Amino acid sequence: MNGTPQGADLAVGVAGGVAAHSPDKFATGPALTHASAKEALAAGLARIAGGARGVDCAPLTQFDSSALAVLLAWQRAANARGMALEIVNLPAGLASLAQAYGVDTLLSARHSRSVDTERSPS
């Protein structure tokens, strides 16, 4: 092994895993629930420690409030490294859940699964 936490190098199809998109971006797995949160958290933290600056939530189809906790933890980890974590393709249901819990303003996320037409000011 190369010293990364077990599970940090998972394929997209593994529940709770993360997959590399590029050196500076990774994707969630298809599920991020209480059962997979610990593994996903560790894998994402390893990617952020390696310099990842973005996470794509497009594969995410099964989630619960644990997904919000993981996304917020990833964001805090990126902020601690002096960078922002761009969260893209947040499923509408997860965005609604974040709003219901009052944490939507804490997520720097774009919620579209389609072609992204909104751009943040540079």
Image: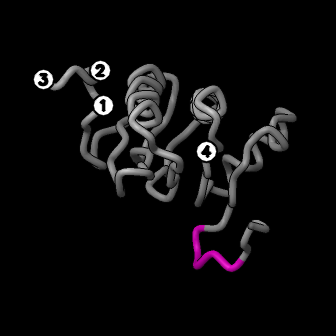
Q: Residue 112: give x, y in percent of width and height.
A: 65, 67
* In this view, 112 is above or below 105: below
Residue 121 falls inside the magenta stretch: no
Residues marked 2 and 1 touching at CB (< 8 Å):
yes
Give amino acid for label 4. Leu
Give amino acid for label 1. Ala
Spatial separation of the CA atoms under disc 3 and disc 1: 11 Å
Spatial separation of the CA atoms under disc 4 and disc 3: 27 Å
Give amino acid for label 2. Pro
The residue depicted at 36 percent of the width and 51 percent of the height is: 23
Quarter-of-image position of residue 80: top right
For label 2, count other residues whose C-alpha is less than 10 Å away and answer few (under 14), some (14-19) or many (20+).
few
* In this view, 107 is above or below 114: above
What residue is shown with label 3?
1
What residue is shown with label 2?
5
3 or 1: tag closer to the N-terminus = 3
Quarter-of-image position of residue 14: top left
Mark linked to residue 8: 1
Q: Dividing the image into 4 quarters, which one contains the N terminus?
A: top left
What residue is shown with label 4?
85
Numbered range of the magenta stretch: 113-117
Q: Residue 72: give x, y in percent of width and height.
A: 66, 31
